[in-house]
Amino acid sequence: MQFKGESIIDEWILKPETVAKSKKYYAHFDCRTDIRKAAKNVTDPNWVAHHGFYPFIHYEKDCSKYTSKGKKDKKRDICYAAHIDRCILQFYCHRMNEVYNQRIREYHIEDVPVAYRSDLGLNNIHLAKQAIDFIKANPKAYVLIGDFTGFFDNLDHAYLKEQWCKLLGVDRLPSDHYTIFKNITRYSVWELDDLLEINDLPKTSSGRKKLNAMRTVLTTDQFKKYRSHIHKNPNSYGIPQGSPISALLANVYMMEVDQKIKAIVAQHNGKYMRYSDDFIIVLPVEESVANDAIKSVNQIIHDTPGLELEPKKTQIFRTNLPEIINVGDSFLKHADKSKNVINFLGFTFDGKKTTLRPKTVSKYYYRMYRKAHVIAENPGQKGKDHLYERYSERGARSGDGKKGNFFTYVQRAEKIFGDAEEIRRPVKNHMAKIRKTLKEGKHKSRA
């Protein structure tokens, strides 16, 4: 399949929002640029085909989870690209995304992959409401909530290449696309901590700030001298998280899977929705039919290279609203049986009402309490004002339309879900909790 003409592509490149998105102010191995400045090269397939990509800079992002029991440590590998490489990947992501949107319409699965879809104009609140509304409209059903283990880290390169060719309608990737494919699968990384050490900078936020104030993270001579720090992906699977094209490629990877699962679900007038590695299937059928359908879905996942259900995050419910019963172990051997509520995209449905998911709220309160204790131990009105701005409805009501906080999100969710729900139930009396925490912290600091 051929892409749209360059005149249309050029118009996209010149859009202020496109240029703004391409500008990054961190330091890398090359000098800063943007997609408008690099347009001549990134739109030239021959130039891209012969381009040598820089290593990604890699670090571990703290993605710790917060529950009523406290903090559960979790790290996520993040890679960020050199400036010119980012512009190339951004451009090819745009081109391929247009084809992807066309393909999923042809396959009648445009309502399945809902993450990273700029054409939908919907956020996770709208999408969660769609799923919950479907469950309400089909009160007797079986609901499967699933999650793939280490999704990006396990994507099989050969299978990705196959789906990439299918997307483009070719038997063999064009040379420019093959160069992109090689960069994203046989990618190399340079640890951020090593770059800080080479530059005699501390491995702290201040050290990272000083590094990013530099023109490039290394001189040409330093790059040559220390190139032994470069590590290549030794595996035949896994793509870097954080690149401009990774999210799209994950959707491309799932095209055939989405088709097959949608076909099964559609037979029973059900709903299948996937947000990256999280998905929900609703089957308004009897148990025996649901059992066969879920077995078929599980087999599709099992037969797809690199895909595996995460047992701790896989749940199956039987609904007879307002009743929700977890029946996971009746269908899948290691399914999670710990919950009798449906959690999807940050919201919880208990069969009657929809609220914010407890995990989302726990994370908010954990951060609030930590900040409040720091402020209580270091008294000052400025600190209190900052706390209220970030963690109360006072901050959500900023008038410039740009600032906001967690309660801005809560208010948006209430507006989308409507007054009949109890979205903010988990954050009831939050102002009193802030004041109580400040007071307790103050007493502790005096002790």
Image (spheres, rainbow, N blue to C red):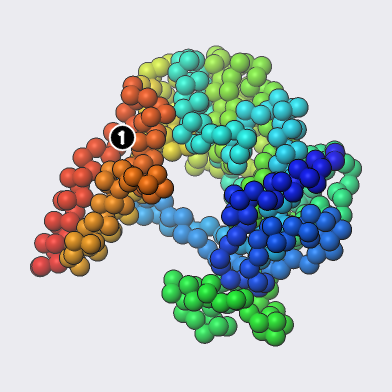
Q: Which residue position holds label 1? A: 424
Against 180, residue 415 (above or below) is: above
Mark 1 residue type: Arg
Q: Quadrant of the N terminus?
A: top right
Asked if residue 264 lies left or right of residue 47, the reply is left
Could you say which quadrant of the image residue 72 lies in?
Answer: bottom left
Work out whether residue 45 or residue 189 is closer to the camera in this orientation and state it.
45
- What residue lies at 41% left-to-right and 48% top-to-bottom? 402
Judging depth in this view, the residue of 252 and 45 nearest the camera is 45
Residues 321 and 9: in front is 9
Residue 112 image position (x, y, % from top left): 62, 30
- Mark 1 lies on a secondary structure that is loop
As drawn, is 121 to the left or to the right of 409?
Answer: right
Residue at x 58%, y 71% (from the top left corner): 27
Q: Residue at x 59, y 49 (%)?
A: 17
Residue 373 in the image: state x and y as whole percent.
23, 60
Residue 96 in the image: state x and y as whole percent: 74, 44
User: Whole-percent x and y of residue 278?
Assistant: 55, 39
Residue nearest the observer in this picture, 306 or 348:
348
Identify whether 233 is placed above or below 407.
below
Q: Residue at x 36, y 38 (%)?
A: 410
Residue 123 appears in the rendering: yes
Left or right of 332 in this view: 227: right
Q: Is residue 274 visible?
A: no
Q: Residues within 10 Å of mark 1 (few under 14, many from 20)?
A: some
Q: Is residue 197 left or right of residue 175?
A: left
Position of residue 87 relative to residue 414, above or below, is below
